[in-house]
Image (cartoon, rainbow, N blue to C red):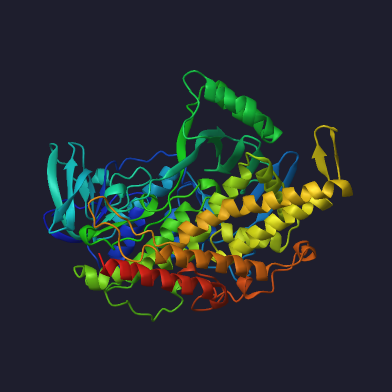
């Protein structure tokens, strides 16, 4: 039940969290469980209504249980997700999640399929459930208000200034804000806290001034419809349709409702008012969707259902807390890091960020779930002095930045690389897309490896790079060994020997395109990306040495992949790679039956990355000291 008295908003809090979305609500609860006092500020506490953030991968489900919030998936009409089905023309290939009996089993939702499962749901139902859980903790005070700006004192953020409307509510103990007392008129107030955490989403108001000096890049927009009683070819699976105009996603968001997301390339959408967007969907996307689904989609278009859209942005993460004139603020969630939602990994990254951040900040109370920790006798870690930013919080945020990389970099790189392939717009990318689909058709480790990365169960960046270049090499192999369609002849056939010289040059271009797709994203993930704000100090030290170190690092990764790659015949094998890049995976503490991104991948897989992180951290520290 809600508190019958107005909470004291004039007191000093440990944390102010701006934004009560997925990450904001989860972080408020985990910090509160660790013994910290939290005020959670949200502009609108009514039921959210969005078209993305509706599929939680198995890795994200595990993070939710780590945080002690697994029950938030109950009672929201969530649907089990057992894997994916990819459609490419008349062909389809299943991509199931791993068996629960293997090393990925347990520490998640109770499976009814025998496989590790994710969950899909209506976004608003999930966020409302997270908010109720956060608001139920006595250390969390919730306030419905609009944050106008961050309060600065002596070059340090000490709180926020916000406006409460006449309908705003606040609560320090209750499942819903509507049950709390409401203020009688609009009012301005200042919330004081030691640390302010900005989690205000993809359209963040404070990102450019306090979190990142990098602008998000929008390559496309998702246009969404909600279908009723859609006859999906593979229920309880995400559906990915590879059309010539861009990928299409379909997944259930309830027992009777299905979401379809259509990727429309370009930053600006065709006009919906003039019917251009509807015509684009009917002519360029609908013919490539499985036939049994077309009447359902046409029915919704004919009924005039509003086409809702969301931009698909890419924003590499920036190391937080390193600028001397930005002490006291941490940016998290989509305000910090975004990737194309094609892989559905955004919420998994955000929830594991909450786990890692709560862990590095420490706390006087146990905040983790006993079954997830594996050791019921484990004690809470020593809480950091939140007021000592230079000696405690700044080093902790460096640790957090690199610790989150094992999972976040995998999801970020995979999402951007797959979108480039699935949304192929030139001949070389089309070859890679065809090769990727045929690689999945091989089955075995050619499916098991990629899906373990996609699901967030295997946070191993080197394994990702290895599989990506296997796809590139297999795509080149298919050019020579498989039939190709020749438009001038109107038929498919294998290339003749006289055509091989031309195919050799084409192979070079395909491999070059593969490098262009993935290496720039790897570059952004290996950098610290310490923000440089306009009013901060000018260039810091080591600006020449750091790019050289990163260039050497990229060469090292490329060399590791080269020596780990198998011969062409091995590409046809379904056996996993024998190299340590694909094995020696740590199963965490406890029984050893499951893998936790909290502990990172195996030492064999991550030794190179750990050295690179240490080097980058060293140069970041050097430059910060010269600021």
Q: Residue furthest right?
A: 497
Question: In the drawing, does residue 199 fall left or right of residue 591?
Answer: left
Question: In the drawing, does residue 114 fall left or right of residue 590?
Answer: right
Inspect this view and state whether residue 425 appears.
Answer: yes
Question: Residue 357 appears in which quarter of the rendering?
Answer: bottom left
Question: Residue 256 appears in which quarter of the rendering?
Answer: top right
Inspect this view and state whether residue 116 appears.
Answer: no
Identify whether 266 is placed above or below 127.
above
Question: In the drawing, does residue 55 fall left or right of residue 245?
Answer: left
Q: Position of residue 448 (x, y in %)?
A: 66, 62
Q: Position of residue 22 (x, y in %)?
A: 38, 51
Residue at horizontal 29%, vertical 73%? Answer: 365
Residue at horizontal 20%, vertical 53%? Answer: 3
Q: Position of residue 223 (x, y in %)?
A: 51, 34
- Name the foreground residue: 568 vs 152: 568
Q: Position of residue 572 (x, y in %)?
A: 78, 61
């Amino acid at each position: 039940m809600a508190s019958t008295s107005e909470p004291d908003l004039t007191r000093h809090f440990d944390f102010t969290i701006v934004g009560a979305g997925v990450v904001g609500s989860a972080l408020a609860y985990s910090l509160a469980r660790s013994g910290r006092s939290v005020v959670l500020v949200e502009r609108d506490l009514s039921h959210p209504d969005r078209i993305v953030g509706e599929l939680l991968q198995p890795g994200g489900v595990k993070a939710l249980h780590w945080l002690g919030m697994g029950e938030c998936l109950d009672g929201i009409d969530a649907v089990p997700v057992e894997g994916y089905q990819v459609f490419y023309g008349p062909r389809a290939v299943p991509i199931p999640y791993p068996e629960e009996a293997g090393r990925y089993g347990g520490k998640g939702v109770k499976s009814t399929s025998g496989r590790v499962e994710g969950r899909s749901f209506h976004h608003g139902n999930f966020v409302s459930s997270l908010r109720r859980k956060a608001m139920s903790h006595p250390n969390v005070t919730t306030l419905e208000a609009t944050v106008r700006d961050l309060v600065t004192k002596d070059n340090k953020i000490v709180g926020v200034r916000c406006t409460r409307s006449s309908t705003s509510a606040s609560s320090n103990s209750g499942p819903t804000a509507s049950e709390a007392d409401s203020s009688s008129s609009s009012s301005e107030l200042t919330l004081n806290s030691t640390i302010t955490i900005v989690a205000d989403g993809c359209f963040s108001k404070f990102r450019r001034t306090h979190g990142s000096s990098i602008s998000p890049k929008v390559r496309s927009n998702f246009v969404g419809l909600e279908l009723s009683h859609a006859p999906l070819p593979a229920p309880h699976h995400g559906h990915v349709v590879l059309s010539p105009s861009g990928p299409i996603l379909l997944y259930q968001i309830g027992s009777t409702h299905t979401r379809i997301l259509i990727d429309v390339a370009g930053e600006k959408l065709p006009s919906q008012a003039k019917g251009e967007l509807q015509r684009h969907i009917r002519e360029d996307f609908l013919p490539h969707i499985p036939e049994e689904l077309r009447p359902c989609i046409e029915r919704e278009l004919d009924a005039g259902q509003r086409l809702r859209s969301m931009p698909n942005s890419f924003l590499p993460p920036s190391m937080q807390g390193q600028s001397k004139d930005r002490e006291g603020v941490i940016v998290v969630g989509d305000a910090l890091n975004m990737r194309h939602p094609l892989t559905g990994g955004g919420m998994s990254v955000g929830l594991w960020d909450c786990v890692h951040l709560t862990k590095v900040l420490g706390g006087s109370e146990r905040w983790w779930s006993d079954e997830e920790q594996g050791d019921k006798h484990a004690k809470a870690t020593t809480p950091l002095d939140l007021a000592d930013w230079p000696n405690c919080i700044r080093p902790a945020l460096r640790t957090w930045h690199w610790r989150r990389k094992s999972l976040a970099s995998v999801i970020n790189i995979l999402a951007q690389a797959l979108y480039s392939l699935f949304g192929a717009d030139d001949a070389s990318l089309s070859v890679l897309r065809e090769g990727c689909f045929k690689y999945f058709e091989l089955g075995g480790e050619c499916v098991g490896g990629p899906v373990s990365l996609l699901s967030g169960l295997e946070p191993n960046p080197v394994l990702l790079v290895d599989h990506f270049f296997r796809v590139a090499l297999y795509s080149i192999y298919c050019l020579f060994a498989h039939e190709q369609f020749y438009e001038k002849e109107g038929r498919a056939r294998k290339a003749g020997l006289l055509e091989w010289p031309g195919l050799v040059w084409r192979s070079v271009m395909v491999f070059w395109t593969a490098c262009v797709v993935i290496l720039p994203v790897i570059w952004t993930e290996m950098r610290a990306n310490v923000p440089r704000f306009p009013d901060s100090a000018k260039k810091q030290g080591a600006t020449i040495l750091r790019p050289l170190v990163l260039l050497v690092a990229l060469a090292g990764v490329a060399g590791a992949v080269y020596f780990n790659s198998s011969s062409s015949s091995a590409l046809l094998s379904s056996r996993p790679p024998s190299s340590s890049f694909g094995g020696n995976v740590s199963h965490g503490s406890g029984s050893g039956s499951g893998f936790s991104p909290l502990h990172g991948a195996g030492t064999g897989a991550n030794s190179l990355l750990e050295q690179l992180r240490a080097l980058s951290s060293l140069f970041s520290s050097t430059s910060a000291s010269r600021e």
